[in-house]
Amino acid sequence: MKIALAIIAMLLLGTCSQPPTVLQQILDSGELRVVTRNLPSTYYLGASGPQGPEFELASQLAAELGVRLYIYSVPNAGDVIRELALHRAHIGAAGLTRGMRLPSQLAFGPPYQQVREHLIYRQGNGRARTLRQAVNTHIEVVAGSSHVASLEAARLTVPNLSWVENSATETEELLYRLSRREIDYTVADSNEFAIGRSFHPEIRVAFDLSGSKALAWAVDARDPSLLQRVTAYYAAVTAEGRLASILDTYYGDVDRFDYIQARVFMQDIEARLPQYRHWFKEAAAQIGVDWRLLAAIGYQESHWVPTATSPTGVRGLMMLTEETARGLGLTDRLDPRQSIFGGASYFLLVRSQIPARILEPDRTWMTLAAYNVGIGHLEDARILTQMHGKNPDLWSDVREHLPLLTQSKWYTQVKRGYARGWEPVRFVENIRGYIDILDWVAADSAPPANRARNDQAVQ
């Protein structure tokens, strides 16, 4: 009888044991499931695989947990929340704004980026200075977004304000439709606008619809385990500078990109690039880089004009000096194929002089700076960076100090003296902008707008 009672007690004790936490379930399964949206500001399939700030952040978290990342995209923010509510994903990393209404079993993680909501219009269509002036116009926004909540709040003071909520679109598509004059206004977060304007140079900010808002992940919060781990993760990436580096990679260049040139660039992608694309690809394959990098350098140098000549004597599609061309074995700098292959070889030569400890993508950005200003001046800027207590192996830090080479107070303290330090900074920023556009509109696969839902498992 005692044995039977003991067995019953053990069985009852077993049935009362606590189920594993959400975090433990992730560790036990070996997989972190993240739902996102297919946008330049979140996640997309680039030339070398998945890219985007949300993808980078999720990848690093999965690596720290020692699990595989499974990331997939859904059409809009409302779908992200539904996927989480149905427990199909653990985290929603999709450019979500804190302030969106969440089901009780979900919670927002810590903020990782501050954005503003802009009312966007197309240049030449007239600009509203207030929402009252936008009454009786076609305003269209993403259904279920925080933009809807902002408009609803505004309607308390502008009662006849109206808009269309589109549940089958995203902000990027609305910006495209706005650029084509299909709608009068839309609302976009400042980070979405910063990227979108590279693709649609005509769009402008009418005014800020709201003050600063925070972007954050939505997290499965049936218990506090995952939220606590995400909070600790963001504290670490912020303190270590990893978050700033990721945001700079995706937004640092587009905020400064020349949007007037961007319009011409989009036209030249269609009219000029097809003549040279196969040579860019062939040359890039020889040196082991993405062909879009070489194409972006070529566009920055000559706008893909093979007969281009500068007042200083550099010539050709990649604008090589006579001395450089001779050293690379070129017989005709104006021959576009020779110029492209020569530019690729020169890029490889410059990159070989960058210290091996400098990792990507900083290695590429510094190579580009040295390609423009010379390896010696880049080294001087790295010395100045170190003198100021910053990291000479990070492009974001070196970029801040290259312009000091124009100031006698600083260039007299380094070996090679004066340099027009703003030029390599602008050179790199422009090329990064061109690469971003090429990566989005000149992909080797189907354009993002035509892709089906992207289910991507990443090791």
Image (tube, rainbow, N blue to C red):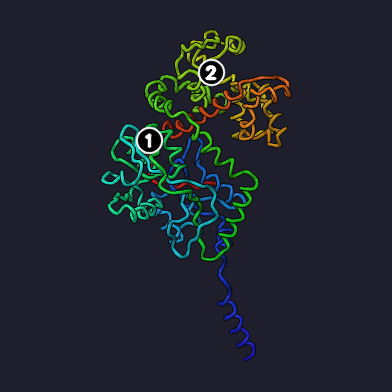
Q: Residue at x 56, y 21 (%)?
A: 344
7 on left or right of 103: right
Q: Distance between the residues labelled 1 and 2?
A: 37 Å
Q: Residues within 10 Å of mark 2 (few under 14, many from 20)?
A: many
Residue 338 is situated, as x and y percent measured from the top left of the image, at 52, 14
Residue 331 is situated, as x and y percent measured from the top left of the image, at 54, 8
Which tag, 1 or 2, sits closer to the chain's start? 1
Whether residue 444 can be seen here: no
Q: Residue at x 57, y 81 (%)?
A: 12
Between 271 and 19, the residue placed more toward the observer is: 271
266 on left or right of 222: left
The mark lying in front, picked from 1 and 2, is 1
Q: Quadrant of the N terminus?
A: bottom right
Relative vertical location of residue 301 with respect to residue 365 in this rendering, above or below:
above
422 on left or right of 354: left
Kind of residue at badge 1: Ile
Query: Callout 2: helix, strand or loop?
Result: helix
Relative vertical location of residue 57 with respect to residue 324 in this rendering, above or below:
below
Between 231 and 447, the residue placed more toward the observer is: 231
Relative vertical location of residue 202 with respect to residue 375 in this rendering, above or below:
below
Q: Residue at x 51, y 52 (%)?
A: 216
Between 458 and 441, the residue placed more toward the observer is: 441
Query: Callout 1: helix, strand or loop?
Result: strand
In the rendered image, the residue lying farthest to the left is 136
In the rendered image, the residue lying farthest to the bottom is 1
Reading the image, the residue beneath label 2 is: 341
Residue 77 is situated, as x and y percent measured from the top left of the image, at 41, 52
Kind of residue at badge 2: Phe
Residue 9 is situated, as x and y percent measured from the top left of the image, at 60, 84
Reading the image, the residue beneath label 1 is: 203
Whether residue 232 can be seen here: yes
Between 45 and 228, the residue placed more toward the observer is: 228
